[in-house]
Amino acid sequence: MAREKFQTLTEQMFYILLCLREECCGMDIMEKVRVITGGRVTIGPGTLYNLLENFMTAGMIRETKVEGRKRSYVLTDVGRQALKDEVARMNVLIGDFRKFME
Amino acid sequence: MKTKKRRFEGFLFYDYEHVARHLEKMAHKGWLLSKITKLYWEYQRIEPTELHFAVTYFSEASQWNPSPSYRQEEFWAYCEAAGWKLAAEWEQMQIMYSEEENPVPVETDEHVKLEMIHRAMKKAWIPGSVALICLTVYQLLDQMPTRIEWFFYDANVLLLVARIFFLLYLVLQSWGYFSWYRRSFRSVENGGKCAEPNVYRKLANVLITVTIIPALLVYILLFGESGWLVLLSAAVVILLLIGMDRLAALLRGLEFSKTANIVTTGIVGIAVMAFVMNGLTSWISDHRELFITEAKEVVADDLLLVVEDLKTPDYEHTELVYELERKQSMFINWTKGRQYATDLYDAFDKLEYQIYEVKTPGLYDHFLALITGEAMIEDSENWRDINGGRWEADTVYQYQFEPGTERVYEELYVICQEDRIVRLGIDWETTEEELNISFEMLGIASRH
């Protein structure tokens, strides 16, 4: 069910997972995504909090440490695979575009 | 200068957009939301300023928790990191504000937002609504007119109307939410935004307003002669709600667990309510004459028909009672006359008549069915039409008692005459002449 839910990733999901390729505090992800995307993608705190909970439930990330009100996470193999699948899906789109439009 | 302001706000729980816009306008006027209680929203005076408000939902939040959970505080910390501060909570609803010019919205994914709202609604609002709908349906079924006496009081009709309106309001509100959820779900699936709350919201508000009118009329009808009781009842309900809210807050401060808080506040609330209701009920029963006109003892001349009109009583009694009772409503004018003796009750010939003047012709057959206990009296084996042109009446039914059955009256008649239904009970076997006189005294002339 959870896998089906994340069969395709939104831009916000994609960048959150990308940030978690290395251990990162949940709260810092908002700023990291803004920097990575040059301000093109912004993630609201409510959305981020809930998506992190959903990723945890789906086993795509895991908690690494808790410091006060700060919890840190890192990508799991399932999460890494989800990112790869998304990139593969986008490559198919790009391939099709090139085949028919260029 | 006032530093606090309390307002009643009638927002739907999921109407986050209107809540946020309203609070922005209030801040612009110099009022910042600081607290939400069951009865009112409290605002603190501030310098008029442009604030941004965002309404979000945290399904684990509860007014019964002794303190915010770790996860809730963590959630607030995320919001704070993005420049959002908590203004107030309303169950799972978290109202945030930001002083920044262009803050990052709290919710940037409509799908996640809809999921959060629905989760919060499933936890608090939906079970509450279902329980309230069931309770209202039960009260409606319980209040259905199954006895003729129900039609003696206009207040019953108004109460029924008020309950039907209230049920419609509840159903419409629930329907409104599910319809909004369906539309939002479709929209979000197609990459759009959550839908605007629909027209049901306004319809529901209209319905709740019109519900109050018959409910108030009931009060005035019941307590018309003691208006202060209306105010007292309203004050008791409001005070009880405030008291329960304060008690819950006090217990939260004393670190009571969620369950202990719910149980304690619930028990205290029920106990206070029972105490107040008990006091009110005993006051009403002590002053019944203000609300219910019961049978009054009268003299023989006040009754249309007494035993003495028909025969000389068998015994000399010192304590003969003549009773008269009257009721008027929009449906019916009802008169009941009764004669009996307080001593040697069974030995004395007693008599009773009831006259129903039906004001609503459409309900005549229904009233006749309620009075006789037969849905189709024409087909009934218990009641036999004995008129046969003997009296100036449409029909004269006599009850056919099985020999040996216990009965209050030896003979029982129901007479239908134009808009009237007359019920007569006589405690002995009457002669033709006695019956003719009885009917005549009750306005049913003999044709012979």
Image: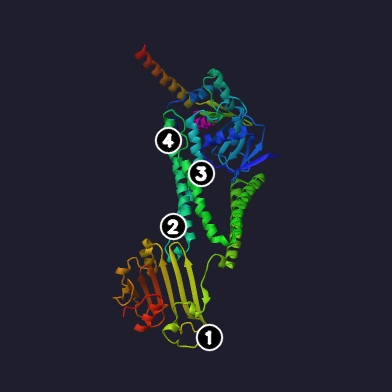
Query: Viewer-nearest of labels 2 and 1?
Result: 1
Residue B125: mark in rendering: 3
- Chain ID of residue with mark 4: B
In the displayed structure, would residue A53 be above or below residue B333? above
The 10 Å Cα crowd at callout 3, few under 14, some 14 to 19, many 20 or more, is some
Give the residue at mark 4: B183
Marks 2 and 3: in contact by CB < 8 Å?
A: no
- Determine which residue is flagged by label 1: B318
Q: Is residue B406 visible?
A: no
- Local packing at callout 4 (Cα closer than 10 Å; few below 14, some 14-19, many 20+) is some
Mark whose residue sits in front, 4 or 1: 1
Q: Are marks 2 and 1 in contact (CB under 8 Å)?
A: no
B445 is higher (above) or lower (below) than A63 = below
Question: Cα distance, mark 4 to mark 2?
Answer: 34 Å
Say which amino acid is labelled 1. Thr
> Gap in Å between the C-alphas at discs 4 and 3?
19 Å
- Tags 4 and 3 touching, CB below 8 Å: no
Residue for point 43% across, 31% down: B187
State the CA–CA distance, disc 2 to disc 1. 47 Å
Three-letter code for the amino acid on which mark 2 is drawn: Leu
Which of discs 1 and 3 lies nearer the camera? The answer is 1
Question: What amino acid is labelled 4 in the image?
Answer: Arg
Tag 4 and tag 2, C-beta contact below 8 Å: no
